[in-house]
Amino acid sequence: MGIQVLVWSKQVCYRLKSNYNSLKGGLKQQRQRLVVEEGRLKQLASLDPEQLQIEIRQLDDQIKNALIIHGALSSVEYTDLNNIKQQIGNITSSLIGNNNRVKFPKSTLLKSKESLYGTLDYYRKMETKLSTMLAELTSQLSGIDMSNNNLDGYRQMLDMNIKNTDVYLEELNSLKVKYQSHDLFSQTGIYCDPNFHRIADTLIGYLHGIEKAIDKEITSARYSAKKVQLIEVTNELDNVSRKINDIRHTLTHFNKAESVDCPKCTHKFKVGFENISPARMQEQLNVLEERKVELTKQCDELKDYIHSNEGWFDSMSSLMKYAQRTDFAAEIVKIIQEYRVGKTDIGVLIDLVRSTMVYGDVNKTLETLGQEKVNIEKQIKFLESSDVETLFKRSEYVERELSTAQRSITRILREVSDIDDQLDLIELDSQQRNRLRILLDELKTSFDGNSKYKVKLRVEEVIQELGPRKDTLSGNLIRAQSLNAVIESIKENIADMERREKHTQLLMEGLSPVKGLIGYLMNDFLKSVIANVNAIIQPIWTNRLHVMNCSTSKSEEDVDLNYNFPVLSGDSDKQNKDIGECSGGEREIINFAFRLVLRRYLGDRCSLPLMMDEVGVAFDELHRGRFCAYIAEQLRLDKLPQVFMISHYINQFGVFNDANVIALNTEGLTIPVKVNGKSKIK
């Protein structure tokens, strides 16, 4: 069958060649005639209408594309960047300047400030105590003659102290009753924790800054999941758009490709597009475009959701970061969840947090009143048993201690002020960095907009340039068509003959077994076969043995096959012209590799076993052993389901598992397997 196809191909090629030569002769005559006619009309016309039409079509496409681009950029305006650049420069200079003024990190400064506040509270209490004692001593010394009246005054002060204490105790109890109906505050006891009182004011500021979410059931995990989903949908939308563009590009090339007649039947086909179905591709394009619409809608919905709840997420993130820096992170998180911060009104929660500050102030006032009561009682006791000399000495001592306490308070306030300045700089630094990121994003957006604006201006210039140019070419086309109408028929005849010549040459190349489309297909197939052949030879043959392709082409643009397969063997760099010039063992292993590769190509369609007749006779002992090992490995991997071998080296081939060994003559035969155990010889 293959020989009949080859003979038929040669006959068709001969007829096509004869037709091709006739076409070349006719083309020569027509071209000579065209030269004569064009020479006669040379003084009348020197313009090529076809070239003018091509240029006009190109200008139409350019103008159309320019108008599309201009329409897409019609809303783009120029943005002045000097203000943004100046702000970025100011922030950068400020950040560089503030860097040297902050000596410690924020956590260290906060701990130092907390420690200083504790020391300051101690000295202020001491100052209050000493001031009270000094005032009392001064009063006692100034009214020493009216000691009985002074004693009555202190007793009245004691009664007033007791009354004030009762009032504040009642207020403290009312606050405790208020928190009993709020489990998170009462069970954890944070309402009476002095450490919580110190952060309550800052916490209220963060709570006031929370923006309400549009989605009442939103969580940070849900918001983050929406952002991840947006990225996935955007990526899928980009992939779908890319596939749509690829299909449209392929269909455009298919529509522009020219159909040719099949040499075997009456059908027409387009070279290079034989396996393409435009209907199936159009159906796939419709499905992708529907999917693109769905993804675009889904992407817009996700963007709206993220934009609507972005304020809630940012403000809640700031609140959670602040909570993590405090000692009440777990309690604040529970409060946020219980009172649905950012989702409902939190006026009750803010009132509860503010009341903790009142609780702390009342508690401190009660402590001050208690200390004052002790001091008054001591003073009453002292007045009842004091003398003037002792009062003067004590007054001097109290005055010295008061001066020391006041100096300490001044020093501590100065240190606290310095820490506050550094903390303000740290907070300002964070705000400036956030502002810098926003400005950089604005700068990038403005840069992109200005780049588009420059493109818009250039497109307008191109439109203004292309319009007059098109008008000039159109006038030239009209004149050229009128002047060249005489030779139009000759050109059409030449074009038709050139097209027939090209089709004939294409058919000749397509039916040639050594060139053209068949040659290219055979060349690719032979490259793959030879590569697999060399891959089989390499693990068996110890010496260099490499089979080359049969192509004699001088470049990658053409193909020329002679079906002689050169071979590189041994240490010589000079290749044999064909496999037939190799040694017996080399020819035998190459022959085996070719048959094994071709059988692999056939796969399940091959119903015959791998036939090996005396393979290895021309091998030496080393290569025969390596060959046996290779066959055994292929059998172990189940890559050779059927093997039929004729050999005198059964002992070396004893690696076959459960092989059916047939011996025609068993006299003197000693082998480690059972002979003719499964065979029926008639």
Image (cartoon, grey):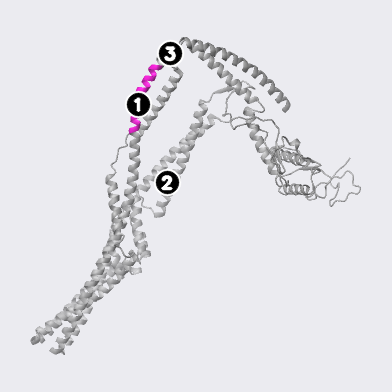
User: Which label is found at residue 17?
Assistant: none
Q: Residues within 10 Å of mark 1 (few under 14, many from 20)?
A: few
Q: Residues within 10 Å of mark 2 (few under 14, many from 20)?
A: many
The amino acid beneath tag 3 is: Ala
Q: Which residue is mark 2?
A: 230
Which quadrant of the view contains residue 427? bottom left
Asked whether 467 falls inside the magenta stretch, the response is yes
Query: Who's the residue at 33% across and 29% down the image?
Result: 461
> Dots 2 and 3: beta carbons under 8 Å?
no
The spot of residue 112 in percent (x, y) is: 31, 69
532 displayed left or right of 433: right
Which of the two discs, 1 and 2, labels the residue nearer the N terminus? 2
Looking at the image, is 440 positioned above or below residue 101? above
Disc 3 element: loop
In space, the residues marked 1 and 2 are separated at their CA atoms by 43 Å
Query: In the rendered view, would you say 225 is above or below 115?
Result: above
Q: State the CA–CA distance, disc 2 to disc 3.
A: 63 Å
- Which SS does the magenta portion mostly show? helix
Instruction: Identify the secondary structure beneath mark 1.
Output: helix
Q: Residue furthest right?
A: 667
Is residue 675 rendered to the left or right of residue 276?
A: right
**Label ID, residue 465:** 1
Asked whether disc 1 touches disc 2, contact meaning CB atoms under 8 Å apart, the reply is no
The residue range painted magenta reads 457-476
What's the residue type where badge 1 is placed? Glu
Q: Which mark is residue 45?
A: 3
Q: Residues within 10 Å of mark 3 (few under 14, many from 20)?
A: some
Check disc 2 and give the amino acid type: Leu
Quarter of the image with the C terminus in it: top right
